[in-house]
Amino acid sequence: MTTIDRLMQADRPWLTDGGLETWLFFQQGFSAPEFAAIVLLDDDEARAALRRYFDGFLEMADRADTGFVLDTATWRGTPIWADKLGRSEADLLRLSRDAVDFARDIRSNWSDRVADILVNGVIGPAGDGYEAGTITDAKTAQRIHTLQIHALAASGVDMISAITMTGIPEAVGIARAAQAEGLPSVISFTVETDGRLPSGDLLGEAIEAVDRETGTAPAYYMVNCAHPDHFRDTLASGSGWPSRIGGVRANASRLSHAELDEAETLDAGDPLEFGELHHELAALLPSLRVVGGCCGTDHRHVGCVSKLLHRQAA
């Protein structure tokens, strides 16, 4: 049985990390263009910080006796970002491969304590994660993302996850690219305060459209980069499609994407409330498999989620 099979058959959610980029840049004082944590893999101090960061979440998984989805720091690694990051396309792909090696080394260090650790190759949007984007057809999206997905696959990831997707065509293209590499995929949509994607699509309609266009290629879907209040009612009123949502990585803040984009300080919200809200979400999501956090969240937030969902002191 593969690691992804064990995740899909788990009787309670696995853990993942929190808001890696906001933790690095707001809490740890690192800097990089375009919120691109991937370029910090060339910085020894940042690599040490990332190792401490993931070690803290893996300690939670150890205490909760559950599996862990270990992300690669590759959200801004698609070659289309090369010019803005001051890197060549080849160098960005080299960093994606390095990110997988880094994640696999962390997994090796924890394999005697956390039995199931899935190395998850992260793909970010070709445009801004807070805006609808300009990719209007799946074929273009597949072409744009194939190089990075191939690099991640060749380096040994277990799964591909498209994080902070803002529209349907890009999600379809990434799912098809992962399928071409023989890898399971996860599509994670972000939503605005009204529960709709930045493209204006309803969350349920987006999930159904990607399933229809890819032959249900994604292993499951997620929602990330939105506060639970922004999508809880949408889930509660949904029919059928909420069963396809297997993961939640919410923001700590109730601010809109536009407000977060302008924010100069980090809104960490209330970690205890964050945990309680996830306990409510779990009741709406019968197929929930992965829980963690997104912007503004850290070990405190995910610890509170684990305490409630795993019924142990996190």
Image (cartoon, grey):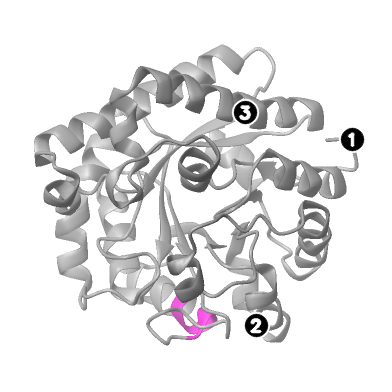
Residue 243 in sight in this render: yes
What percent of the width, then of the height, locates residue 46?
41, 26
Q: Is residue 223 above or below residue 302?
A: below
- Marks 2 and 3 sit apart, C-alpha to C-alpha, by 32 Å
Amino acid, disc 1: Ala
From the viewer's side, name the closer residue of 1 and 191.
191
Sequence-earlier tag: 2 or 3: 3
Instruction: Classify residue 40 by image quadrant.
Output: top left
Instruction: Classify residue 15 by image quadrant.
Output: top right
Residue 153 in sight in this render: no
Q: Is residue 283 above or below residue 35?
A: below
Residue holding disc 2: 234
From the viewer's side, name the closer residue of 150 and 304.
304
Residue holding disc 1: 313
Q: Are marks 2 and 3 in contact (CB under 8 Å)?
A: no
Front: mark 1 or 2? 1
- Marks 1 and 2 sit apart, C-alpha to C-alpha, by 31 Å
- Circle 1: element type: loop
Left or right of 299 in this view: 145: left
Front: mark 2 or 3? 2
Report crowding for label 1: few under 14, some 14 to 19, many 20 or more residues within 10 A (C-alpha).
few
Find residue 116 and name its label. Answer: 3
What percent of the width, then of the height, locates residue 308?
86, 49
From the viewer's side, name the closer residue of 58 and 221.
58
Find residue 106 and name its label. Answer: none
Q: Quadrant of the C terminus?
A: top right
Q: Residue at x 45, y 75 (%)?
A: 258
- In the image, the segment drawn in magenta is 202-206
Q: Are marks 1 and 3 in contact (CB under 8 Å)?
A: no
What percent of the width, then of the height, locates residue 219?
50, 55
